[in-house]
Amino acid sequence: MPLPTDQDLVTDWKSRPAPLLPLLHAFNDRDGYLSDEALRAVSQGLRIPLADLFGTVTFYHHFSRFPPGTNAPRVCTGQVCRFAGGLELLETMRKDGATPMPCAGRCDEPVPVLTGRSVQVGVTVGEFESRPSPLPVANPGGLEECVFAAIRNPGNDTLEGYRRAGGYSGYEGALGSDPENLLTVITDSGLAGRGGAGFPTGVKWRAVREALNPRPGDDTRAGPKSVVCNADEGEPGCFKDRVLMDHDPHAVLEGMALAGYAAGAEIGFIYLRYEYPETADILDRAITEAENAGLLGENILGSGFSFRIHVRRGAGAYICGEEGSLLNSLEGKHPFPRERPPFPVTHGFENRPTVVNNVETLASAAAIARRGAEWYRGLGAGDLAGTKIISLSGDIMRPGNYEVPFGFPLQTLLNDWAGGPRPGRHIQAVTMAGISGGFLAKEDLDVTLDEPSVRSKGSMLGAGGIMVFDDSRDMLEVAHSCMEFFAHESCGKCFPCRIGTQRLTERLAGAAGPGVLAGWSDEVEDIGSVMKATSACGLGMAAPLITESLMRYFPEQVAAHVEATNS
Amino acid sequence: MSDPSSETTVGSIEVDGKNLNFTAGETILEVTRRHGAVSGEPCKIPTLCYDERLDPFGGCRMCVVELEGSHNPVASCARAAEDGMVIRSSTEAVEKHRKTLLEMVCSENRQVDVDPLSGYASQELKELADRYDARSGRFAGKKSGKSREDDPNPFILRDYDQCISCYRCVRVCAEQEGDYAISVKGRGFDTQITVEFDGHLKDSACTFCGQCVQTCPTGALADRKALRHTEVPGEIEKTRTICTYCGVGCSVDILTKGDSMVGVQPAMDGPANHGALCVKGQFAYDFVQHDERLKTPMIRGEDGELHPTSWDVALDKAAQGFLDARDKHGRHSVYAVASGRAPHEAGYTTQKFIRSGFWSNHIDNCSRA
Ligand SMILES: Cc1cc2nc3c(=O)[nH]c(=O)nc-3n(C[C@H](O)[C@H](O)[C@H](O)COP(=O)(O)O)c2cc1C
Ligand code: SF4
Ligand code: SF4
Ligand code: SF4
Ligand code: FES
């Protein structure tokens, strides 16, 4: 088959929703990189000014402007992989044009190497293989689960398999009754966002349902509203959404369709991180299955409700997990975060009311619609409602995804469920919320896994990524790699984060800054406090938790570092 | 600025103990500035990425203010006023953050003090650095931005060593000029103002209107023509006038040092242009003090050369020329094309001259498309 021409590609995508990213990917898939001619064709075809398009393309670190582009391997040098041989691997692969990439969401199985549309894992050259995402082990505490309840069933990733465990029955039930009933169930279940911010899901869906269309003069409630599944999962140390999408894709689709029905939306997008190419195929296959079964499409099951889902791949930008940035990215704009308020529930995709939910939130909603609010609430410990997936990785015997009840003790997870540290080692620190919650160490490891407990230590649970570092690790090195990540991913919109992440990285590297501890701490604290208070989005607010917790738990290591910088 | 007590008022906010009413869609900063302008106690909230003509952006965070009930301070330039908000604009904590931000900004720049000829807003960073005593040398580290002084155009200096990534230039080009000639490349500390493929302005969609230069708060984008006069002694004086190039009537400030004209800046409050100009109004002023500029009327003599003369002689000569042509070739041998640069009055006079002077309606205007 002859390769498609520029014009073929443009014509193919031009009239579809959110066309910029998939069109650029189409050129990328054809050529391996984005040439000047490609950008000119896209600019003309989608009527995006060339300078603007050029700027936007350079924002994404997986878009290459020159060959070999996507054909050159990218080696994960994330916080876990760098200690698992990632740095050495990168060096040996440099001759193949390999470059580093930040955490690629496979910390349970280091080290991922991404080439073209495939991810391979391994530590030594010649021993790589493509493998499905590891399944979670059977719940070590024998506790009842929500999102992992059926995930280990063979064939669960097919429509038939998903149905066997009751899949889509909640959806079918909902379609036969008033959306109000569904909203009530979700609200009563206590389900809150699993993407980090913990906003009550029922409240969000209702806000979109009730939002008037912000187009001037148009005050109907109907209007094209959307549901966006946030599958960007860019947070280092988080790989929970990947396992859900890979092994339970229909749960995510069902959750989206439920959100669509409850909120009155007709169109859904899955914004999937670039580093999960195989997942895109799995989702596309599941969508086709669901469409063929009449579960997605027009007038679903005769209910009058229509809903379609489109997968859109990102292109390498952590900030595109932040919902405003994500929406700008979907719309083909420069992916800076948006000022809030207004929020996506009123001004989302193309300025229309939009539900943005994390993968895990949506998969949970599917289970709740099937089994009820009461059941879900009961899964949490004490008064806390429901469960949370924790992605556990690093210096721990059994890394992987674990579904725990909210309120579960961290120490039990680390030592009983996951086998504790390597023999002869002890846990020096763990990161929280991926790395956005900074470190917990020492007696603060006695927290329970829920926001009130973790936040009382100045950290947060967030999306539930926890990386473990034992006493063999240099915490300055860990902190530096975390801050380097934030600096690499800072979008550059706001001053405190754009300059602050850079300055903190330099100070953690010993590359700049006062050589006296008091002066060093002064600068680091002032930068941290201005970032926390004034940054335009969560990235800049969270980044200084790294330095803050480093200085709190490891003052001697910090002092030695400054001393060494000085000499 | 409209009357704050006008009937479009939809509510009021309290800023530093004063109740200020606001109109639909106004931001906290706009409300505070509008009232400040009227009360004679100007609003002191500092800004760097803000240009009142542009959509709120919220980049520099200099304008943050404390809002009761909000955990973090909010960007007053981007936050719409809501009835009952209680705001403190300059608490100690907020002022400390502003100073830290400025110290951070100074640390990324190679130079904070730039020649005021650079552009209309070029002193904004310098003035804030003075006000907050921010040249402390704290937060030393890598500098940001990479100068493109190699761009060969005669008008705009692209000295991004001085750039603080406020993106006012990019936004003014898109929102005011509608040109989208420049954009932001890369991200984080490495962002860089660019045109497509890192090229030169002359190969881009740029029309050299100069608006990016005039909104730049640091002189990173600077008026190359004006900067030729850096060494001319004397203070810069501004004289408000109207651009003579066309009938739009853009207000401009002519910059002079002593008797020399050293530059042109658009009037931000010009009713016809709100700070916009075109390449001619902005940059094409060298004729004013050009050596070869005509200063008296000239008549071509028998010798074929031009000779200075008086207006009376010159006008008589021209009138005679018109009459001779009419007598020899008839009234339709004379027609007029009015200049697009001419205001209404001059256009009117031109058609009158042809219609009642020659009994002809052969008239046109050069800007007829
Ligand atoms: C820097 C940054 C990155 C984020 N990345 C993600 C992400 O990868 N996935 C996600 O679901 N939410 C992410 N979020 C949170 C989203 O902005 C948003 O709150 C979430 O998608 C809402 O869904 P939920 O209510 O179901 O959690 C991120 C936020 C920030 C500030
Ligand atoms: S905090 Fe960082 S990532 Fe967020 S808007 Fe500011 S610069 Fe961008
Ligand atoms: S001179 Fe005018 S057109 Fe050119 S980049 Fe600046 S604002 Fe845009
Ligand atoms: S060139 Fe000037 S206006 Fe443009 S981003 Fe830099 S400092 Fe701001
Ligand atoms: S003036 Fe408000 S953020 Fe810059």
Image (cartoon, rainbow, N blue to C red):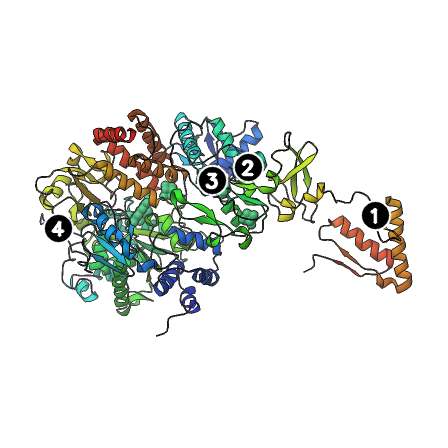
Q: Is residue B82 left or right of residue B267?
A: left
Q: Which residue is mark 2?
A: B121
Q: CA distance from mark 3 to mark 1?
A: 50 Å
| Nearer to me, A217 or A21 | A21
Q: CA distance from mark 3 to mark 2?
A: 17 Å
Q: Amino acid at mark 4?
A: Glu
Q: Disc 3 and disc 4: Cα gap in Å?
A: 59 Å
> Which image quarter is the C terminus of chain A in?
top left
Residue B298 is tagged as 1
Question: What amino acid is labelled 3 in the image?
Answer: Asp
Inspect the image, locate mark 1, and give the three-letter code of the amino acid beneath it: Met
A557 in relation to A431, above or below: above
Residue A297 location, x and y as percent?
A: 32, 66
| Chain of the residue that carries numbered disc 4 in the rendered image | A
Measured as percent of width and height from the top left, residue A228 is found at: 33, 55
Label 3 resides on the chain identified as B
How far apart are the alpha carbons under marks 1 and 4?
101 Å
Tag nearer the camera, 2 or 1: 1
List the residue tagged with mark 4. Answer: A144
Q: From mark 2 to mark 1, how far is it between C-alphas?
A: 43 Å
Asked which secondary structure carries label 3, the reply is: helix
| Residue B272 in sight | no
- Whether marks 2 and 1 lie on the same chain: yes
Q: Which of the two marks, 3 or 2, is nearer to us in this view?
A: 3
Where is residue A447? Give x, y as percent: 17, 36
In the rendered image, residue B295, in percent from the top left (x then y), is placed at 79, 42
- Between tags 3 and 4, which lies in front? 3
Chain letter for mark 2, please.
B
Which label sits in the foreground, 1 or 4?
1
